Image (spheres, rainbow, N blue to C red):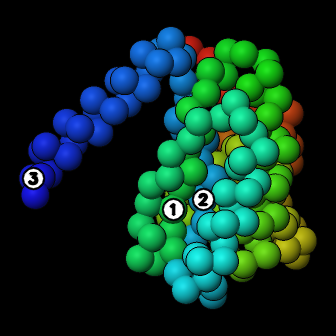
């Protein structure tokens, strides 16, 4: 059995290998997450084949799945070069399909993470119109000049989110 330090080293080695495979230009920060709230891990045997079907339509995407399957929470991490327009162009359609699937199982698109700028366009699908209107009212009360995090949680769309993607190697 591997100790924690060995697991961390193997993980680092894996990502180094992946970055070399993709010319050190892969991006692994966009996660499509499913968190069981009312659905629970007992639905994974139905959910995962549907998810894999969606992902199989995107032959050029290599992805990993990590997470906490015991509570139905995992992340799909696409490994792709976002400097290439053809790769960036795949994300909106893929996100929409995965989010629709997640919502059909009463899951969460952000799991234990926050919604962030990339998920803002899907907030109404997750929370409903009434709650999103409350987000907007709260934003207007505490930030009437829209100085803090514009486009996050309120008034953001997929074009705005993509205009903020970092294409630099980290």
**Image check: 24 left or right of 166?**
left
Crowding around mark 3 (Cα neighbors within 10 Å: few <14, some 14 to 19, many 20+) is: few
Distance from Cα at disc 1 to Cα at disc 3:
22 Å
Residue at numbered disc 3:
3
Tell me the number on the disc at residue 33: 2
Q: In which quarter of the image is residue 103?
A: bottom right
Crowding around mark 1 (Cα neighbors within 10 Å: few <14, some 14 to 19, many 20+) is: many
> Would you say residue 138 is visible in this rendering?
no
Q: Quadrant of residue 80?
A: top right
The kind of secondary structure element at disc 3 is loop
Q: The N terminus lies in which quarter of the figure? A: bottom left
- The mark closer to the camera, 3 or 2, is 3
The kind of secondary structure element at disc 1 is strand
Which circle's residue, 3 or 2, is located before the other in the chain? 3
Q: The C terminus lies in which quarter of the figure? A: top left
Crowding around mark 2 (Cα neighbors within 10 Å: few <14, some 14 to 19, many 20+) is: many
Are the residues tagged 1 and 3 within 8 Å (C-beta)?
A: no
Give the residue drawn at x 58%, y 76%: 44
Residue 143: x percent and y percent? 73, 50
Are the residues tagged 3 and 2 within 8 Å (C-beta)?
A: no
Q: Quadrant of residue 107?
A: bottom right
Give the residue drawn at x 50%, y 45%: 64
Give the residue drawn at x 20%, y 46%: 7
Viewer-proximal residue, 15 or 127? 15
Residue 3: x percent and y percent? 9, 53
Distance from Cα at disc 3 to Cα at disc 2:
27 Å
Viewer-proximal residue, 112 or 59? 59
Position above or below: 70 against 156:
below
Residue at numbered disc 1:
74
The kind of secondary structure element at disc 2 is strand
């Amino acid at each position: 059995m591997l100790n924690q330090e060995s697991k961390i080293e193997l993980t680092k080695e894996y990502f180094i290998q992946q970055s070399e495979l993709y010319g050190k230009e892969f991006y692994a920060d966009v996660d499509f997450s499913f968190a069981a709230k009312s659905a629970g891990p007992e639905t994974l045997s139905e959910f995962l084949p549907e998810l894999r079907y969606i992902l199989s339509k995107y032959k050029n995407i290599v992805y990993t799945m990590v997470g906490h399957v015991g509570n139905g929470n995992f992340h799909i991490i696409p490994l792709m070069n976002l400097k290439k327009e053809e790769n960036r162009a795949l994300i909106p359609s893929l996100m929409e399909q995965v989010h629709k699937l997640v919502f059909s199982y009463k899951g969460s698109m952000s799991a234990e993470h926050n919604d962030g700028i990339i998920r803002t366009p899907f907030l109404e699908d997750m929370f409903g119109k009434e709650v999103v209107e409350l987000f907007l009212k709260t934003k207007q009360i505490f930030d009437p000049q829209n100085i803090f995090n514009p486009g996050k949680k309120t008034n953001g769309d997929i074009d705005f989110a993509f205009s903020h993607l970092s294409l630099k190697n980290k």
